[in-house]
Image (cartoon, coloured by chain):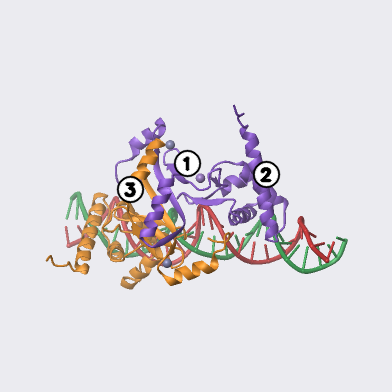
Chain colours: A purple, B orange, C green, D red
Amino acid sequence: MVPVKKFRELDENLVRQKEAAFADFIQRKGLKTTRQRNTIIATFFRLRGHISVEELLNQVKQVNPRIGYATVYRTLHLLVESALVEERRFGDGLARYEGHSDVEHHDHMICLECGEIFEFFNPRLEALQESLAEENNFQIFRHRLELYGACKDKDACQKRKARGNTAAGAE
Amino acid sequence: MVPVKKFRELDENLVRQKEAAFADFIQRKGLKTTRQRNTIIATFFRLRGHISVEELLNQVKQVNPRIGYATVYRTLHLLVESALVEERRFGDGLARYEGHSDVEHHDHMICLECGEIFEFFNPRLEALQESLAEENNFQIFRHRLELYGACKDKDACQKRKARGNTAAGAE
DNA sequence: CCGAAAATGAAAACAGTTTTCGTAATCCAG
DNA sequence: CTGGATTACGAAAACTGTTTTCATTTTCGG
Ligand SMILES: [Mn+2]
Ligand SMILES: [Mn+2]
Ligand SMILES: [Zn+2]
Ligand SMILES: [Zn+2]
């Protein structure tokens, strides 16, 4: 029987890999290595999920309170440019960032009741999109698919949904 | 042979239908009928495509130059609330609005080169989404699917794409 | 070390949108 | 028809998330 990898360990390896990749990117671009940037990316890569700028800054400030919004924004732009991180917008007005997990590309289901975000990937769906694009003589570079709704298994989400939703006035 | 319906005529009927529906909505909500709102919705429903607030205001001003942003924004909110209009965000920072055309629901392909927007609808795609949601025990209220890429048939879009796209620096 | 180049952080600027507030229009009860 | 409470208007101010500016500090190859 293959031993189960310890989760934390695996994660740390991945994180270090990403930190190295970013260092590489910085060097290739002729930019400079700074303490602030290191703090920011180290913090970011150790967070899970879809992180807003404010969330990240709060975490970062616990390491170095002098770091401000500007540097966080600037570093996130670099991370996106380096293709280590993707920007997401789920319609609440905030940009969110995720270092793409094990799955390279994935789409999202967003629970409007509890805010939870499920990730999924389906090859048939991807293929179908391609074939539809083909029909329209269109070449896809990237796409975004988001399903908004409610967790079926969580009581809270079902109850809240049952109340507030008549027909018209739903966000 | 069935006579071909004159396009303009058909459209006008639809527009009047929508104007009436909005009037209804206003009344049901106990709001007041105003000249400005009438101008705005009359203008909006006669425009095609995915209209930004600024575009709409410009058109509106040609009828009544005293109308300002505030009223346009407010009226668009009412239109959305009435479910006669949908808000779209294609990632350029602007809200866009469309009075849904003949097709109730549809998704979008957006050419990053020329900005053109193609609409499409595919039942298999919709069904597949449903079944994926089902698997995750998720109930879809609405979804958004956007394919970003380039027109294949337009020379301009292909050329521009060929130049600017190495790997990293693409929006 | 030097010094050019790049980065930082606080604050100002920005863009799109929303809110405020004084005035004007609507519309129903009388 | 009004009167008058209610709703809407428009200009300007406020707001939110993000970007830019600018004076100062840090980095790093020579
Ligand atoms: Mn994700
Ligand atoms: Mn559309
Ligand atoms: Zn939920
Ligand atoms: Zn195009």
Question: How far across and down, in percent of the image, does residue D23 sit?
Answer: 72, 64
Disc 1/disc 3 C-alpha distance (Å):
24 Å
How far apart, in angstroms, are the residues tagged by discs 2 and 1?
26 Å
Q: Which mark is residue A16?
A: 2
In percent of width and height, residue B32 lies at 27, 56
Query: What's under tag 2, amino acid-wise?
Result: Arg
- Given residues A14 and B13, the one toward you in this image is A14
- Residue type for callout 3: Arg
Identify the element where label 3 is drawn: helix
Looking at the image, can residue A156 be seen? Answer: yes
CB at mark 2 closer than 8 A to ligand 1?
Answer: no
Q: Position of residue A73 (x, y in %)?
A: 60, 54
Q: Nearer the viewer, residue A164 or B121?
A: B121
Mark 3 vs mark 2, CA separation in Å: 42 Å
Of badges 1 and 3, nearer the viewer stands 3
Looking at the picture, do discs 1 and 3 lie on one chain?
no
Q: Which mark is residue B124?
A: 3
B136 over B62 or under it: above or below? above
**Residue found farthest to the front:** A1
Residue found at x 67% / y 48%: A19
What is the x, y in percent for residue B131?
36, 40
- Looking at mark 1, is its residue's CB closer than 8 Å to ligand 1? yes
